[in-house]
Image (cartoon, rainbow, N blue to C red):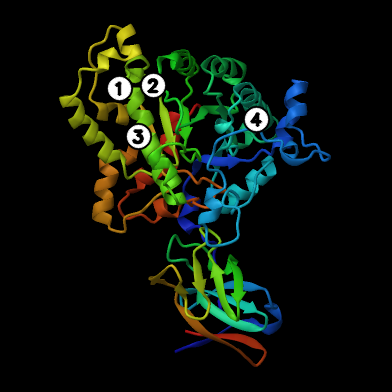
C-alpha cells in the first residue's frame, strides 16, 4: 500500500472535487461537507470523468452521478444501485499533516 | 504530490481531424419568432403573461413523447441538455473543444417540430430555424457547418427551402427525421430528391421522440427504452426499406442518406434479411407508385447493395461489444470502414465522445481516420 498526498486541505473545500493520478490510477476525490471520498475516476460505462459528477446525499448516504451518462455510484462502496456487477474502485482517503492523503 | 488528472478524451485525439456529423444546436421558440415575418403566427406563438389556462401555452398542438427521457434518468436532469446548450458560435466552439472535435455539423435541437400538427406553422418555424442557425451558428471560415432543416411534411415547401438556402456553403446536408409519419419512399418526394441530387446535398435523417398512441402496442409501451431507444432503429429500418423497395435509389442513384442516432448493430441484419426476403417476395415492387411510373419491374440491385451504396450511418449511440473479434466482424458486415460517420449527439444524455474509435482494437489506423472524418468528407458537401 502506498500513501500519496494529493492536495493541501485548503485546496479542496466542502462541495469541491478534483481528479488526480496516483500510481497510474485515475482517482476522483470529493469533499462532501468535510467528509472525504476517493473513487475510481473513470466511469466503467464509457470512461466519463467522475470527479466532475454531481454528488447527492440522502440520510448520510452519498452518491455521485457520472457527468456523461448519469450512472449513479455509491461514494462509500463504489457500487451502482442498478446492478451489483457495476462497481468503481474506492480508496482510503484522509487528512494528514494538513494534506489530503490517498492510500492506493 | 500526485499528478494532475488528464482530460477524459484520450490523448490520441490530437492526432486526428474529427468531424462530428450530429452536434445539436438549440433554438428556443422565442429565438425563432424573430425570424418569422407572418405577424399572426408570431402573435399566436407569443406567450401572453396575462393569459389563463391553455392560453398561457405558446407551443402549437402536437403529438409527442417529449419529456419521456427525463423520466428514465436516475438523476434530476434535463436529458436533452446534460452537456450544455449551444445557441451561438462561441457555445459551439467551447463544446467541441472539450470533445476534441474539429468540425461540427450543427443539427437542429428542435426535435418537437415534426410533431406539430399544423403544417403552416410548422413550416414557418422550420424556415425560421434555418435563418436563425445561419445568423447565429454556422461559420464555414472556422469549420462550423450546418444542416438545412426541411419541412418534410410538405414536399413542395421542402423544395422551396432547398431553393432558398441549398446553395449556401454553410449547409453541407439537408436534414429531416425518420419516425412514425409518412415515409420518404412516397413518390411525392421525388422533386425533393431531384433537388438534393442537383445540389449535391445528402439527406440526414434523425430519430424523433414520438410515443405511438391509439394503437394496441403503442398504448402499452411504458418505458423510454421501448418508446425511443428501440423504436428509432426500427423506424430507421422502415424508412430505408420503404425508400429502396419503392425504387427511390434506382431513380436517384446519386442520392445519399445519412441515418443518425439509430446505432449500428442492426445493419448486418437488415442487409441479409432483406436480400433473403426479396428473393421470395419480389412481385409487388412493380406496383409501388414510383416503380409503376418508371415502368420498372424489379429493383436494379439487391437491397443490401443500396444499404452500402446510398446509405451512411452516424455511429451514435455506439453500443460496443467488448469482444474485438466479434466487433471486427460486425464492423466488416456493416461497411464501417467506408460508411460509418462518427457523431456525438451533443448535448443529449446518450452522447458519445470519440474515445470508442480511438481506443478500438478492432479498427486499424485508416478506418479510424475514415470514421472520424474522411467518410464525412466524402458524403457531405464541404
Q: Are marks 1 and 3 on the same chain?
A: yes
Q: Nearer the viewer, mark 3 or mark 4?
A: 3
Outermost residue on the right side: it is B50
- For numbered disc 4, what is the local secondary structure? helix
Residue A12 image position (x, y, % from top left): 67, 78
Dot label at residue B185:
2
Which residue was labeled with disc 3? B237
Q: Earlier in the sequence, mark 1 or mark 3?
A: 3
Residues at discs 4 and 1 in contact (Cβ within 8 Å): no
Dot label at residue B245:
1
Q: Are marks 4 and 2 on the same chain?
A: yes
Q: Earlier in the sequence, mark 2 or mark 3?
A: 2
Is B303 placed above or below B334 here? above
Q: Earlier in the sequence, mark 3 or mark 4?
A: 4
Quarter assignment of residue B309: top left
Which residue sits at x=39%, y=35%? B236
Q: Earlier in the sequence, mark 4 or mark 1?
A: 4
Q: Chain of mark 2?
A: B
Q: Chain of mark 4?
A: B
Please tell me how crowded label 2 is: few (under 14), some (14-19), or many (20+) other residues with Cα within 10 Å: many
Which residue sits at x=26%, y=27%? B303
Distance from disc 1 to disc 2, alpha carbons, whole Å, reads 8 Å
Q: Is residue B82 left or right of residue B301?
A: right
Which residue sits at x=78%, y=40%? B52
Q: Is residue B212 left or right of residue B33?
A: left
Amino acid at each position: 500500500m502506498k500513501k500519496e498526498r494529493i492536495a493541501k486541505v485548503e485546496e479542496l473545500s466542502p462541495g469541491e472535487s478534483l481528479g488526480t493520478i496516483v500510481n497510474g490510477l485515475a482517482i476522483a476525490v470529493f469533499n462532501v461537507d468535510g467528509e472525504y471520498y476517493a473513487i475510481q475516476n473513470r466511469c466503467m460505462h464509457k470512461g466519463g470523468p467522475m470527479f466532475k459528477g454531481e454528488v447527492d446525499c440522502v440520510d448520510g448516504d452519498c452518491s455521485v452521478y457520472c457527468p456523461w451518462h448519469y450512472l449513479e455510484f455509491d461514494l462509500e462502496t463504489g457500487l451502482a444501485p442498478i446492478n451489483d456487477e457495476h462497481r468503481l474502485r474506492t480508496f482510503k482517503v484522509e487528512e494528514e499533516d494538513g494534506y489530503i492523503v490517498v492510500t492506493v | 504530490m500526485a499528478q494532475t488528472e488528464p482530460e477524459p478524451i484520450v490523448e490520441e485525439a490530437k492526432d486526428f481531424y474529427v468531424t462530428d456529423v450530429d452536434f445539436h444546436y438549440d433554438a428556443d421558440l422565442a429565438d425563432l419568432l424573430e425570424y418569422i415575418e407572418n405577424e399572426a403566427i408570431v402573435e399566436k406563438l407569443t406567450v401572453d403573461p396575462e393569459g389563463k389556462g391553455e392560453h398561457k401555452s405558446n407551443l402549437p398542438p402536437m403529438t409527442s413523447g417529449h419529456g419521456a427521457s427525463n423520466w428514465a434518468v436516475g438523476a434530476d436532469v434535463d436529458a436533452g441538455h446534460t452537456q450544455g446548450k449551444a445557441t451561438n458560435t462561441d457555445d459551439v466552439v467551447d463544446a467541441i473543444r472539450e470533445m476534441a472535435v474539429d468540425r461540427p455539423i450543427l443539427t437542429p435541437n428542435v426535435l418537437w417540430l415534426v410533431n406539430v400538427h399544423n403544417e403552416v406553422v410548422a413550416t414557418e418555424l422550420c424556415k425560421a430555424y434555418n435563418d436563425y442557425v445561419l445568423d447565429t451558428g454556422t461559420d464555414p471560415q472556422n469549420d462550423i457547418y450546418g444542416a438545412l432543416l426541411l419541412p418534410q411534411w410538405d414536399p413542395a415547401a421542402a423544395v422551396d427551402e432547398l431553393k432558398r438556402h441549398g446553395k449556401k456553403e454553410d449547409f453541407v446536408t439537408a436534414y429531416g427525421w425518420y419516425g412514425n409519419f409518412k415515409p420518404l419512399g412516397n413518390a411525392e418526394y421525388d422533386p425533393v430528391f431531384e433537388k438534393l441530387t442537383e445540389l449535391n446535398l445528402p439527406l440526414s435523417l434523425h430519430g424523433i421522440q414520438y410515443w405511438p398512441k391509439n394503437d394496441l402496442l403503442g398504448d402499452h409501451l411504458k418505458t423510454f427504452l421501448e418508446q425511443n431507444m428501440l423504436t428509432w432503429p426500427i423506424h430507421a429500418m422502415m424508412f430505408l426499406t420503404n425508400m429502396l423497395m419503392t425504387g427511390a435509389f434506382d431513380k436517384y442513384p446519386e442520392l445519399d442518406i445519412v441515418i443518425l442516432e439509430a446505432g449500428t448493430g442492426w445493419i448486418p441484419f437488415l442487409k441479409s434479411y432483406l436480400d433473403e426476403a426479396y428473393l421470395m417476395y419480389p412481385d409487388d415492387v412493380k406496383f409501388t407508385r414510383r416503380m409503376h411510373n418508371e415502368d420498372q419491374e424489379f429493383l436494379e440491385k439487391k437491397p443490401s447493395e443500396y444499404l452500402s451504396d446510398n446509405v451512411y450511418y452516424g455511429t451514435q449511440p455506439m453500443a460496443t461489444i467488448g469482444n474485438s473479434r466479434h466487433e471486427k466482424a460486425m464492423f466488416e458486415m456493416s461497411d464501417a470502414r467506408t460508411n460509418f460517420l462518427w457523431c456525438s449527439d451533443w448535448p443529449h444524455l446518450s452522447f458519445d465522445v470519440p474515445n470508442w474509435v480511438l481506443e478500438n482494437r478492432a479498427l486499424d489506423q485508416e478506418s479510424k481516420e475514415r470514421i472520424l472524418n474522411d467518410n464525412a468528407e466524402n458524403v457531405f458537401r464541404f
